[in-house]
Image (cartoon, rainbow, N blue to C red):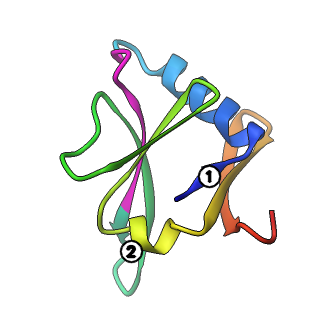
């Protein structure tokens, strides 16, 4: 299952707090995103997980992993780095983190 670094958990909580009207059931959803000639990962703050989403809760942060990408993220770590006013998320292998 995808794990979160402390930095990622903090960044997810910041994103959740910044989203107006987000209920307590809300979180950051990771899903497949069509990039035209390839597929990448998309991030969006959502009020509830999708029906088949994996729900990960760490340090008060909630991440919903869409069923179509869960197998690819199963042995990964979500990390985050503050870059000025922006947050840069990255995914690495669990052994590398």
- Is residue 38 covered in magenta? no
**Observer-nearest of 27 and 2:** 2
Task: Judge depth for marks 1 and 2 and give the one in front.
Answer: 1
The residue carrying pointer 1 sits among few (fewer than 14), some (14 to 19) or many (20 or more) residues within 10 Å by Cα, namely many
**Observer-nearest of 66 and 57:** 57
* Quadrant of the frame with the C terminus: bottom right
The percent position of residue 76, horizontal first and vertical second, equals 62, 65
Could you say which quadrant of the image residue 77 lies in? bottom right
> Residues at badges 1 and 2 in contact (C-beta under 8 Å)?
no
* Residue found farthest to the bottom: 37
Q: Which mark is residue 50?
A: none
Determine the residue positioned at 53% across, 17% down.
17
SS at mark 2 in the image: loop
Measured in 3D between alpha carbons, the distance from the residue under mark 1 to the one under mark 2, in whole angstroms, is 25 Å
* Residue found farthest to the left: 51
The percent position of residue 71, horizontal first and vertical second, equals 42, 72
The percent position of residue 34, horizontal first and vertical second, equals 33, 72
Q: Which residue is mark 1?
A: 3
Q: Give, as a single range, the part of the protein colored magenta.
A: 22-31
Q: Is residue 7 left or right of residue 47?
A: right
Mark 2 or mark 1, which is nearer the start of the sequence?
1
- Please tell me whether residue 49 is drawn above or below residue 67 in the rendered image: above
Q: Which residue is mark 2?
A: 35
Determine the residue positioned at 68% across, 42% down.
8
- Is residue 28 covered in magenta? yes
Q: Is residue 3 left or right of residue 31?
A: right
């Amino acid at each position: 299952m995808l794990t979160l670094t402390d930095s990622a958990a903090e960044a997810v909580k910041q994103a959740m707090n910044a989203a107006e009207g987000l209920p307590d059931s809300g979180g950051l959803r990771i899903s497949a995103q069509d990039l035209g000639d390839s597929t990448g990962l998309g991030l969006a703050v959502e009020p509830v997980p999708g029906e088949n989403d994996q729900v990960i809760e760490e340090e008060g942060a909630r991440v919903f992993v869409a069923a179509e990408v869960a197998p690819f993220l199963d042995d990964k770590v979500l990390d985050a780095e503050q870059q000025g006013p922006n947050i840069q998320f990255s995914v690495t292998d669990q052994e590398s983190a």
